[in-house]
Amino acid sequence: MPAQLATSLEMAAAPRAPDFLDAVARLRALLADDLDAVNAQILSRMESPVQLIPDLAGHLVKAGGKRIRPMLTLATARAFAFTGDDHIKLAAAVELIHGATLLHDDVVDGSSLRRGARTANVIWGNKESVLVGDFVFSRAFELMVAAGNLRVLQVLSRASSVIAEGEVLQLTTQKNIDTKFDTYIDVVEAKTAALFAGAAHAGAIISGANARAEQALADYGRYFGVAYQLIDDALDYAGFDSDLGKNVGDDFREGKMTLPVVYAVARARDEEKSFWRRVIAEGRQTDADFEQAVALMNRDDAIADTVACARKYADRALNELENAPDGDFKDALSNLVKTSLSRIA
């Protein structure tokens, strides 16, 4: 048998390394009953006599998503042996906060695709999306109050305000090619990681974890959230639409200063500065500019270093997770972080 053919057959027969979707599926299986209850809570909270509200909110809910954030709440609660049902309300609240921010984000960004489907603002309009987003936010807070834990209410309320701050901070960096690494990480920690942190923290709080474990799980969520967003940043320049649930290159076309762009601009040669100023700061782009941007990023390791940065945050998340009790939920949360990096492998 030719060596090349033998190698190909060996590769085909070898077990496939677990990837991120496998890790999500495993965690979802562990939490199957809880997730069914969360989905039921979400659907019941979308009811309204104003028919546009359940129609538009239902479009977002039915679009799916991995439910990572609510699963963090459920899994951390279960990891600490929580036996009540308040984690269901809080997980639903977390997902509604996330859903509300998506409705608002799509209007701000002018997005047309979310999770592979047309965005609500494209179908119903910007005003409608913003107002229904406000409705969804209010329902999330009703669920937090229903859970009856003031500390969790404080944590998730604070996360909601930090997310809004992150959105505003991102607006100040958009099209600003002078944006530095630290400023961009501030955006990510606020806009994305704050809800990851709040979701994991909430589960630890209601389960009665000690103060050290509580903080560790909050930090786990925060570091995981940063790592997850940085991989998303890299995928916008090195991925496929199916990986992102949106169009590859959207961040570039919107002039967003994500980490690959921050690195690329900082490392650009003098004659290339005008390119980045034109395509990002001025927003004057041609069909060939995205390919040129990717080529410059690859030459200067901007994408590779974004992934390396994500790996550092993932390692920090795993280190904090050591403070959780050993068991299936801890293992599943660990695999979620480890395999999240594989989305761009």
Image (cartoon, helix red, strand yellow):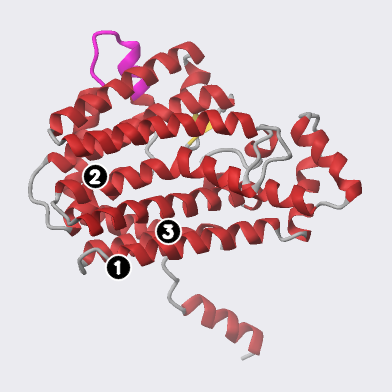
Q: Is 227 drawn above or below residue 109 in the view shown? A: below
Q: Quadrant of residue 248?
A: top right
In the structure shown, which secondary structural element does the residue marked by tag 1 occupy?
A: loop
Judge whether residue 228 is colored magenta: no
Tell me the number on the disc at residue 322. 1
Residue 121 in the image, given as x and y percentages of width and height: 50, 19
Residue receiving disc 3: 20
Provide the residue designation for mark 2.
Answer: 202
Gap between marks 1 and 2 measured at Cα: 18 Å
Does residue 155 appear in the picture of this structure? yes
| Residue closest to the eye, 26 or 339 | 339
What span is in magenta? 46-57
Looking at the rendered image, the quarter that the C terminus falls into is bottom right
Residue found at x 47% / y 38%: 191
* Tag in front: 3 or 1: 1
Looking at this view, is 222 or 38 the one in front? 222
Q: Is residue 51 magenta?
A: yes
The residue located at (91%, 47%) in the rendering is 271
In the orientation shown, which residue stands out farthest toward the front? 211
Decide if residue 67 is in sight here. Answer: no
Q: Position of residue 141 (x, y in %)?
A: 25, 26
Query: Furthest-top residue in view?
Result: 50
Image point (75%, 42%), residue name:
290
Q: Give the residue type that dot 1 points to.
A: Glu
- Residue 336 appears at what percent x and percent y? 37, 59
Residue 169 image position (x, y, % from top left): 55, 32
Give left or right: position of 139 versus 237. Answer: left
Tag 2 secondary structure: helix
Q: Earlier in the sequence, mark 3 or mark 1?
A: 3
